[in-house]
Every structure is written in structure tokens, then in C-alpha cells.
């Protein structure tokens, strides 16, 4: 039983690592978009 | 099948790294503690995932079109100087050179990881990604093994992946204890109640996994971290009640052999394992006395020739009562402090202690600013700083009996501490600039102190 659980957990962890990577990229884009109007305002 | 999942997953997770190196730092930490190769048996076993992600992150960082100004700091300088000192100690080693340089190579990679984390991480989402990656990697082991420990009625002994730094049950227990505050931070970063409850459930299994290592040092570090966390908890009475209930339930649940093992903490001085440690500490001290500046080089105390040579002076430390040293077999240092003392000499030890002293000062400096800082966007910095102090405490206490001085988890958290302080300095300077600019000079409506920050910068 634990072998199946371990395999499922393994796949889940890989999937979460993919999510972390993409989420960071998406938030980076948002952060840069948010910073641009601010820069314009300052100038 | 697992090989294919890992390979496809790896390709997918690497894609954003080319554009966003911070994702690479998160995955670098994840692979450093998850050891993907350990879980596969086919074609993927030989793929160096950790090295690949490290190389891609470095290349992506160097090729970044928009380079931001780098702010350097004392703590980061001290880590780099410590690394240079280990290099000097490796050149002047008295131990077996191939082993020394093999260990130096490991610490070199840790330093590169530290450096990249320090240079790349700036903003909240970047630092969070690294913390989530670390929790995910260690959480895999604690969830898997913790459930086995619970289901087996406490009979299952937990140890880490073979040939890794957390293979030893004591090292694994320390890593789990260090992950405990990081998991609490992770919980605080999610608004979804489902995710929060899932993570709280995971936390229970995580604690069970620490107990399942049968490590006395792990148990002590768990107790210290729990106390540290309870002191500041908002619902202190509730947490203390839950802790007492957990202790009573645990006392009924755990088998006698677990209780017997923990009971030896009070009689440690008669314990053969503790006596062996004291002998190794004396031997490390003697190596440093013979080579006060640079020590013996990495793993010097584990080298039989060095062990036998310094053993001749063993009587010099007879004022600390221990049995005679074991002339048959060399031992590991069994303490981060004596490990650095024997490996890098007194100067190296001063630098090593200086790193943690500075880390403490940084965290203290951040936490002191909490009261006068009204900006809600800085809350995560204070939350993480407090929890990082708990992580440091666990490492410094449990590490006193473990050979885990060159631990990548600790070094990336040191980098995050430096990033946090610089982030807060930046936000403070930003608010000061905007606060002291008059409405007339700006030509805009005056903003309140709390809203003087740009949310995107926090």
C-alpha cells in the first residue's frame, strides 16, 4: 500500500515543484508590470 | 514510469528558469534536499538534476537583460571569506588530500548556491518560492516516513536517503526541526482555508516524523523550537493545551524502546555514544592546537593518520575526564563547532561563529523595527525573520552533537536573512524619501505613512 502512496506522493511533489516554478514566473511578471507605472509616475 | 515523470516534470519546471532565475534558485534548493535521483531506478538515475538546474540558473542570471544594482553586506562577505579560508585550509591540509578536496568541492557548490541566492533573491514572491521549495523537499520525506511511523505504532525507524547529508537519522531530525518554522511560515502565506488545514495536518505528521528518527538531538531541537514558537503564539493557552494533550497521547502511543532511548538523555555522560563524541571533540581540539591557524582541512579528524598522530597528545586534555582515545578507528567530529575547529582551525571557527552572530544581529535588527513600521506589506519580513531565528536556534543547539557544519539548507537561509534585511532597508529608505518630500515639491496629494510604499515592491 505504501509503495503506491509513495509513488503518488512522488508525482505530487514533482507537480508542486512545477507549480512553484511557474507561479514564481507569473508573479515576477506581475511585479514588473506593477513597477512600470510607478517608474513612469516618478519620472 | 517514475523516471519519465521526473524527466518530463524537470523539463517543465526548468522552462521558466531561463526567464526568471529566482525560480531556478527555488528549484536548486528543492533538488539539493529532495535528491530526485534517489527515487528512480531507470534511465533518469544518472541525470545530474541538481547540477543542471544550478548551471541553468547561473547562465540565466548572467544573460539577464535587465540587471539590477547589487547591494552587498557584511554577513555575505563573511560567508565568502569563510569559504576562502576553507580553501586555504585545504591547501595546507594534514589529511588525505583527495578526501579534503572532495569535501571542499561540496562546500564550494554550497557557496555558489549561497552566492546566487544572495544575488538573485529580492522580492517577497522570490524568497517565498525558495522557502516553499525547501519545505516541499523535506516535507516529502517527513510525510512519507511520518505516516509509516504512525501506522507502525512507532516501530518504524526513520532515516534519510542513502549517501546524502541527511542519510543519518540525527541529521534528518535536525533538518526536519529546521523545516518546522519554515512550514509555519508557509501556512501564514496562504489565504485558502483548505490549504492551511492541509498544511496544519501535515505539520502533525512532520512532528511525528521527528520523533520517528529516534534521535535524541532531534527530540531536544523539537522541544526548543516548539517552546520558541509557543512564546510568541497568539493563542498561547490553546497551543500549550494541545502540546500537553499531544505529549500524553505520544507517551501512550510510542513504544518502550523509543522511551528508553530518550531516557538516556539524562544519563548521557555514561552513554557510550556520548563518550565517543567527547573523545572526537578532544581529538578535533588537538588538531586545532597543533594547527591553530588553518586546522587540519576538511574531514581531518576522520583521517586515521591524523587521528593517531594527535592521539599521542591526548593526555594534554586529561582535565576533561573521558576514557582513553580509540586508537583503532577514527571518528567523525560529531559537533558543528568541533568539526569547524578541527577542519579550519581557531580562525575558521571564529569566522563560523561570526556568521551566526551576524545572522542573529540581522534578525534582531529586523525585528526591532517591527513596532515603528506600520506598513502591512512588510509583515511577511517580520514573520519570516522571527521564524528564521527559530531555525537558527534549532541548528545551533542540535548541531552541537552533529557533523553538519557545511549544510546547504542553513547557508541558503543565511542568504535569505541577508536579503530580508536589505529588503527592509530598501523599503524603509523608500518610505523615508516619500515621507519627507512635501506635497508642494511632489505636486501630488500627500500620502499617509502606511501607504507610502508601492505594493509591488513589498
Image: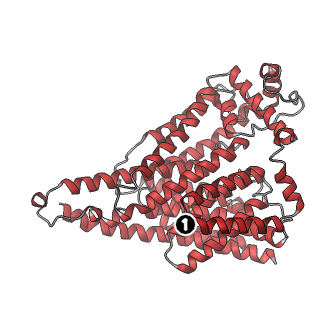
Q: Is residue B213 left or right of residue B230?
A: right
As rendered, which of B150 and B82 lies closer to the eye?
B150
Relative image position of residue B127 (x, y in whole percent): 48, 59
Relative image position of residue B358 (x, y in whole percent): 49, 40
Q: Is residue B380 left or right of residue B30?
A: left
State whether residue B8 appears in this view: no
Residue B188 sits above or below residue B387 on the image: below
- Name which residue lies at 82% across and 27% down: B321
Q: For the N terminus of chain B, which image quadrant?
A: bottom right
- Chain letter, disc 1 residue: B
As rendered, which of B230 and B1 lies closer to the eye?
B230
Quadrant in the picture for residue A40: bottom left
- Name which residue lies at 74% across and 24% down: B286
Q: Tag 1's secondary structure?
A: helix
Quadrant in the picture for residue B273: top right
- Name which residue lies at 88% across and 31% down: B326
Q: Residues within 10 Å of mark 1 (few under 14, many from 20)?
A: some
Q: Is residue B181 left or right of residue B215?
A: left
As rendered, which of A42 and B440 lies closer to the eye?
B440
Q: Is residue B94 left or right of residue B458?
A: right
Residue B409 sits above or below residue B156 on the image: above
State whether residue B391 appears in this view: yes
- Total tally of numbered discs in the picture: 1
- Judging by the rendered image, the residue that carries numbered circle 1 is B186
Residue B361 sits above or below residue B94 on the image: below
Relative image position of residue B8 (x, y in whole percent): 62, 72
Amino acid at each position: 500500500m505504501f509503495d503506491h502512496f509513495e509513488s503518488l506522493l512522488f508525482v505530487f511533489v514533482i507537480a508542486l515543484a512545477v507549480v512553484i516554478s511557474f507561479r514564481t514566473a507569473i508573479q515576477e511578471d506581475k511585479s514588473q508590470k506593477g513597477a512600470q507605472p510607478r517608474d513612469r509616475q516618478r519620472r | 514510469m517514475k523516471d519519465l515523470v521526473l524527466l518530463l516534470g524537470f523539463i517543465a519546471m526548468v522552462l521558466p528558469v531561463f526567464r526568471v532565475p529566482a525560480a531556478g534558485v527555488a528549484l536548486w534548493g528543492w533538488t539539493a534536499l529532495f535528491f530526485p535521483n534517489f527515487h528512480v531506478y531507470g534511465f533518469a538515475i544518472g541525470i545530474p538534476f541538481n547540477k543542471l538546474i544550478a548551471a541553468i540558473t547561473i547562465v540565466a542570471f548572467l544573460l539577464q537583460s535587465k540587471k539590477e544594482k547589487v547591494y552587498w553586506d557584511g554577513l555575505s562577505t563573511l560567508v565568502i571569506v569563510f569559504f576562502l579560508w576553507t580553501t586555504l585550509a585545504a591547501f595546507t591540509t594534514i589529511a588525505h588530500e583527495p578526501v579534503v578536496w572532495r569535501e571542499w568541492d561540496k562546500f564550494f557548490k554550497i557557496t555558489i548556491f549561497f552566492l546566487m541566492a544572495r544575488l538573485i533573491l529580492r522580492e517577497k514572491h522570490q524568497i517565498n518560492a525558495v522557502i516553499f521549495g525547501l519545505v516541499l523537499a523535506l516535507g516529502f520525506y517527513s510525510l512519507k516516513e511520518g505516516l509509516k511511523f504512525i501506522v507502525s505504532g512507532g516501530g518504524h525507524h526513520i532515516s534519510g536517503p542513502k549517501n546524502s547529508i541527511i542519510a543519518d537519522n540525527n541529521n534528518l531530525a535536525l533538518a526536519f526541526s529546521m523545516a518546522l518554522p519554515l512550514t509555519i511560515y508557509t501556512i501564514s502565506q496562504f489565504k485558502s482555508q483548505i490549504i492551511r488545514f492541509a498544511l496544519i495536518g501535515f505539520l502533525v505528521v512532520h512532528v511525528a516524523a521527528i520523533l520517528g528518527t529516534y534521535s535524541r538531538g532531534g527530540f531536544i531541537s523539537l522541544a526548543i523550537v516548539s517552546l520558541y514558537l509557543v512564546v510568541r503564539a497568539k493563542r498561547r493557552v490553546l497551543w500549550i493545551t494541545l502540546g500537553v494533550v499531544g505529549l500524553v497521547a505520544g507517551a501512550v502511543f510510542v513504544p518502550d524502546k523509543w522511551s528508553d532511548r530518550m531516557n538516556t538523555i539524562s544519563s548521557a555522560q555514561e552513554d557510550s555514544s556520548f563518550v565517543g563524541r567527547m573523545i572526537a571533540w578532544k581529538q578535533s581540539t588537538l588538531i586545532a592546537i597543533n594547527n591553530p591557524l588553518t586546522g587540519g582541512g576538511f574531514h581531518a579528524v576522520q583521517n586515521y593518520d591524523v587521528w593517531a598522530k594527535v592521539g599521542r597528545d591526548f593526555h594534554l586534555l586529561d582535565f576533561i575526564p573521558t576514557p582513553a582515545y580509540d586508537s583503532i578507528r577514527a571518528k567523525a567530529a560529531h559537533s558543528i563547532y568541533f568539526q569547524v575547529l578541527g577542519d579550519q582551525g581557531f580562525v575558521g571557527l571564529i569566522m563560523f561563529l561570526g556568521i551566526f552572530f551576524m545572522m542573529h544581529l540581522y534578525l534582531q535588527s529586523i525585528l526591532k523595527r517591527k513596532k515603528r513600521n506600520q506598513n502591512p506589506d512588510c509583515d511577511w519580513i517580520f514573520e519570516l525573520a522571527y521564524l528564521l531565528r527559530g531555525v537558527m536556534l534549532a541548528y545551533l543547539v542540535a548541531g552541537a552533537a552533529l557533523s553538519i557544519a557545511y549544510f546547504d539548507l542553513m547557508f541558503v537561509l543565511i542568504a535569505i536573512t541577508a536579503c530580508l534585511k536589505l529588503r527592509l532597508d530598501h523599503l524603509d529608505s523608500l518610505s523615508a524619501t516619500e515621507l519627507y518630500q512635501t506635497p508642494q515639491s511632489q505636486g501630488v496629494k500627500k500620502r499617509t505613512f502606511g501607504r507610502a510604499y508601492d505594493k509591488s515592491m513589498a
